[in-house]
Image (tube, grey):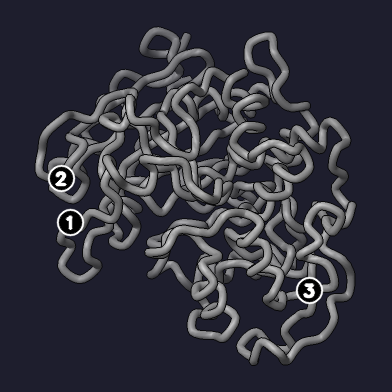
């Protein structure tokens, strides 16, 4: 017999979870949040605080959030559909669809000039994109190098003052740069996910969003998920804050009405462009826990889900990823210390905190966290709109998971 009406959580544990979340809101550092925890068919939701840091409308269960990097696990599903249907193969070169990535050159040294290169040893494959090892990415340890400066200057990443250009122009700019590492050599963050969105669109002849909607969002009932918020829902989107790292003072990074997500973007970014709600995300992660099934409908094959949600990195790649997390713990506020990486999400390969090995999911720079845990058949989703320019949302996320795991009642 499980506690609280067979929810799998103890009533005391859920009360403590609410108290911990409320404490963060009461501190004044987090204006508001929505959290969903689920086990089996049961869910428990807390909506605490307000949409704006100066008060106003309350957070609600149907509040829409900018998901930032928690877009990655969901956007990845589009590529998995194409693998299931044999429209993509893991070790096929991507050149037929992405000719901009043919005949790559690779930097001789990571901090060297952009014209000091050697030829790539082999073509970039679908697998390289899926595992974030195709040779380019965001690396906070190499800020200030010519290649990282070029990535920023060319508008190849989100979160810059200038939005990313439309996909063909984005690919053209990407194709003008050398790779940082040989294809398949090293795990690197972010850019591969945006390339994947372009790949899906070119393979299917549909926009990335249209394909995601037809194959993932609509079948799962994810009615509030997309790459922008339509006018009739914009009042459900809070502002996104990026507090000043020194003073902690709230600064609006993106306003809802008239902001970046108020109209369709030129680039539908699988790395960080989605907006969604706790219930939409819960439907997706429940489908993964159910081996690809949503009710009686199959969304992804079981092997596709297993590929996504288990570690895909070699021991050498894992060591480099772990070193990145551990050496930058003061910058990341402890995010990213999981060991492994599957397709589009972290996978715990060692027990470093209260979550068991096998838990999968990811966190977002806008103050979002979404994970599922096969061992406990558990999902946890916590959404804020306070950016990781300060440690407060990360501390809230850590406290959420620490308390949630204590609330399990078997």
Residue 408 coordinates in the image, percent (x, y): 43, 26
Q: Is residue 208 above or below residue 374?
A: below
Distance from the alpha carbon under mark 1 to that under mark 2: 8 Å
Q: Earlier in the sequence, mark 3 or mark 1?
A: 3
Q: Is residue 114 left or right of residue 242?
A: right
Residue 221 coordinates in the image, percent (x, y): 53, 18
Label number found at residue 250 = 1
Q: Is residue 6 visible?
A: yes
Label number found at residue 328 = none
> Could you tell me which secondary element the residue under label 3 belongs to?
loop
Q: Nearer the viewer, residue 165 or 275?
A: 165
Residue 369 coordinates in the image, percent (x, y): 43, 43
Distance from the alpha carbon under mark 3 to that under mark 1: 41 Å
Q: Is residue 53 above or below residue 57?
A: below
For disc 2, the marked residue is 53
> Could you tell me which secondary element the residue under label 1 belongs to?
loop
Q: Nearer the viewer, residue 274 or 110?
A: 274
Q: Earlier in the sequence, mark 3 or mark 2?
A: 2
1 and 2 marks in contact (CB < 8 Å): yes
3 and 1 marks in contact (CB < 8 Å): no
For disc 3, the marked residue is 182
> Could you tell me which secondary element the residue under label 2 belongs to?
loop
The picture quadrant where one finds residue 356 is top right
Q: Earlier in the sequence, mark 1 or mark 2?
A: 2
Q: Is residue 268 left or right of residue 135?
A: left
The residue at 28%/23% (across/down) is 12
Q: Is residue 180 visible?
A: no
The residue at 39%/13% (across/down) is 3
The residue at 13%/48% (across/down) is 28
């Amino acid at each position: 017999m499980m506690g609280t009406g067979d929810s799998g959580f103890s009533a005391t544990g859920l009360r403590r979870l609410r108290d911990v979340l409320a404490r963060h809101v009461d501190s004044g550092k987090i204006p508001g949040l929505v959290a969903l925890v689920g086990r089996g068919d049961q869910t428990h939701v807390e909506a605490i605080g307000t949409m704006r840091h100066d008060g106003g409308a309350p957070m609600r269960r149907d509040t829409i959030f900018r998901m930032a990097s928690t877009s990655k696990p969901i956007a990845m599903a589009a590529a998995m559909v194409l693998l299931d249907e044999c429209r993509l193969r893991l070790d096929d070169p991507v050149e037929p669809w992405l000719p901009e990535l043919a005949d790559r050159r690779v930097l001789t040294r990571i901090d060297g000039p952009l014209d000091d290169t050697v030829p790539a040893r082999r073509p970039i494959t679908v697998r390289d994109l899926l595992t974030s090892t195709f040779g380019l990415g965001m690396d906070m340890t190499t800020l200030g190098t010519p290649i990282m400066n070029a990535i920023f200057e060319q508008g190849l990443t989100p979160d810059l003052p200038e939005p990313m250009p439309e996909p063909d122009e984005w690919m053209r700019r990407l194709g003008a740069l050398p790779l940082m590492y040989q294809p398949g050599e090293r795990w690197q963050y972010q850019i591969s996910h945006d390339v994947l969105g372009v790949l899906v669109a070119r393979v299917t002849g549909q926009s990335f969003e249209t394909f995601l909607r037809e194959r993932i969002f609509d079948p799962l009932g994810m009615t509030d998920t997309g790459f922008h918020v339509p006018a009739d829902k914009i009042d459900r989107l809070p502002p996104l804050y990026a507090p000043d790292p020194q003073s902690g003072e709230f600064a609006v990074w993106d306003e809802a009405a008239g902001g970046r997500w108020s109209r369709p973007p030129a680039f539908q970014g699988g790395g960080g462009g989605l907006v969604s709600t706790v219930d939409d995300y819960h439907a997706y992660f429940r489908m993964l826990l159910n081996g690809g099934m949503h009710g009686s409908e199959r969304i992804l094959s079981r092997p596709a889900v297993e590929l996504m949600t288990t570690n895909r990195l070699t021991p050498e790649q894992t060591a480099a990823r772990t070193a990145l997390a551990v050496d930058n713990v003061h910058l990341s506020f402890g995010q990213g210390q999981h060991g492994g990486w599957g397709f589009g999400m972290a996978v715990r390969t060692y027990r470093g905190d209260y979550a068991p090995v096998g838990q999968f999911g990811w966190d977002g720079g806008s103050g979002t966290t979404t994970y599922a845990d096969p061992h406990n058949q558990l999902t946890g989703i916590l959404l804020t709109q306070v950016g990781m320019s300060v440690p407060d949302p990360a501390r809230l996320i850590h406290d959420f998971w620490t308390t949630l795991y204590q609330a399990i009642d078997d």
